[in-house]
Image (tube, grey):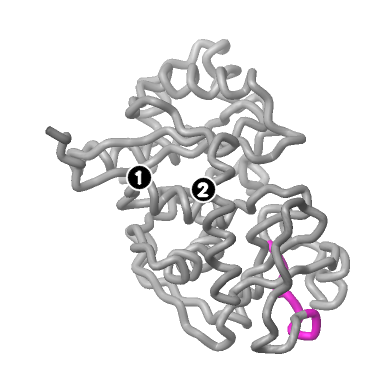
C-alpha cells in the first residue's frame, strides 16, 4: 500500500557555494513553519549545478547547520547534479515544441544591446533584445549531444503572467517587457536555475515554494516553463530579505553572520528563531 502524499509539500533548496547565513536561516525557518502549520512535509534539495563554486564540504555544512537550527525534512536529500537526465528530457520537450532557440551571445552582448544598467545582478538576466532572436516560426536546429551554445526559452511577447503570492498578494509581469527570453540550458551542458527548479518542483509534487523576494522575477519564468511542460504551478510565498546595517542584502560573504560563526559566538537556535518570530509579527 502506498503512503498517502501530504496535501502540503514544501522544499528547502540551499546552494552549497558557501556557508549558510542568517538570511538563509530565516527563509528556511519560514518554509518550515508554513509546512508545519499545514501539517505537511519538507524536502531538502541540494542546488549543486554550479560546477565551479559548489563544494562537498558546504553540503555537509548546510545539513549540519539546518539540523542545528531544528529543521527537519524527508530523506533522502535531492541533489540536482544527479538529475541531469530529467532536465535534459524537459529541454528536449521544449525543443520539440519549438519553444527554445540557440544563443551564442555573451552576457556582455545582451547587457550592451539592451541598455541594461550595470547593477543588474548575477542572479538575474537583462531583457533579451528582440533583434537577437531568430524570426518567429523558425524551427530550432538539432540539440546535438554536447554543449557549445546556450539555449533560451522564447517568451510569449505581451502575455501577462500573474500569480497570488502568499505574502505580497497579486504579482503581475508582462513577458517581453519585464523579462525576456531566458536561459534554459548553458553552453557548459548544464541546465539553468529556471529549468531545473521548474522540473524539480513539478516532479516532486511541491505545493508551495517559499524563497526570497529577490526571486519573484524567476517565478514568472518558471511559471511559463511549467505551463509549457503541461505541469501544475505550485503556490508561492516570497519572504523578505534580511539586510545588513547599510541596507545591503546578506550574502555568503557576510562571514560574521554565517550560522557557523553565530554558533561559535554562543548564539542558540532558540535565540535566532525568537528573533525571526518577532520580525514576522
The mark lying in front, picked from 2 and 1, is 2
Q: CA distance from mark 2 to mark 1?
A: 37 Å
Q: Which residue is mark 2?
A: 86
Seen at 59% across and 52% down, the residue is 88
Residue 254 visible somewhere in the drawing:
no
The magenta-colored residue range is 125-132
Above-or-below relation of 167 to 127: above
Residue 112: which quarter of the image?
A: bottom right
Q: Is residue 50 left or right of residue 20?
A: right
Residue 36: which quarter of the image?
A: top left
Q: Earlier in the sequence, mark 2 or mark 1?
A: 2
Instruction: Give the quadrant of the N terminus.
Output: top left
- Residue 116 position, x and y percent, is 79, 72
Residue 213 visible somewhere in the drawing:
yes
- Pointer 2 local density, CA inside 10 Å: few below 14, some 14–19, many at least 20: some
Camera-side residue of 200 and 23: 200
168 is within the stretch colored magenta:
no
Total numbered labels placed on residues in the image: 2
131 is within the stretch colored magenta:
yes
Amino acid at each position: 500500500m502506498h503512503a498517502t502524499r501530504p496535501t502540503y509539500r514544501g522544499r528547502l533548496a540551499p546552494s552549497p557555494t558557501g556557508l549558510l547565513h542568517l538570511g538563509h536561516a530565516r527563509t528556511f525557518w519560514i518554509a518550515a513553519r508554513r509546512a508545519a502549520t499545514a501539517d505537511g512535509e519538507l524536502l531538502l534539495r541540494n542546488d549543486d549545478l554550479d560546477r565551479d563554486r559548489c563544494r562537498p564540504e558546504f553540503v555537509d555544512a548546510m545539513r549540519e547547520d539546518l539540523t542545528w537550527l531544528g529543521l527537519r525534512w524527508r530523506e533522502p536529500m535531492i541533489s540536482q547534479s544527479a538529475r541531469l537526465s530529467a532536465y535534459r528530457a524537459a529541454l528536449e520537450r521544449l525543443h520539440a515544441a519549438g519553444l527554445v532557440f540557440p544563443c551564442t551571445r555573451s552576457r556582455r552582448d545582451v547587457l550592451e544591446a539592451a541598455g541594461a544598467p550595470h547593477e543588474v545582478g548575477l542572479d538575474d538576466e537583462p531583457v533579451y533584445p528582440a533583434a537577437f532572436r531568430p524570426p518567429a516560426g523558425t524551427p530550432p536546429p538539432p540539440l546535438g549531444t554536447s554543449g557549445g551554445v546556450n539555449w533560451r526559452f522564447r517568451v510569449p511577447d505581451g502575455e501577462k503572467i500573474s500569480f497570488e503570492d502568499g505574502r505580497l498578494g497579486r504579482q503581475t509581469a508582462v513577458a517581453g517587457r519585464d523579462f525576456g527570453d531566458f536561459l534554459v540550458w548553458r553552453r557548459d551542458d548544464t541546465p539553468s536555475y529556471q529549468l531545473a527548479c521548474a522540473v524539480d518542483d513539478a516532479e516532486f509534487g511541491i505545493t508551495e515554494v517559499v524563497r526570497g523576494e529577490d526571486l519573484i522575477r524567476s517565478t514568472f519564468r518558471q511559471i511559463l516553463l511549467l505551463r509549457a511542460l503541461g505541469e501544475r504551478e505550485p503556490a508561492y510565498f516570497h519572504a523578505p530579505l534580511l539586510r545588513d546595517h547599510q541596507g545591503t542584502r546578506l550574502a555568503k560573504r557576510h562571514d560574521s553572520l554565517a550560522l557557523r560563526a553565530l554558533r561559535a559566538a554562543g548564539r542558540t537556535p532558540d535565540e535566532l528563531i525568537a528573533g525571526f518570530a518577532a520580525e514576522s509579527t
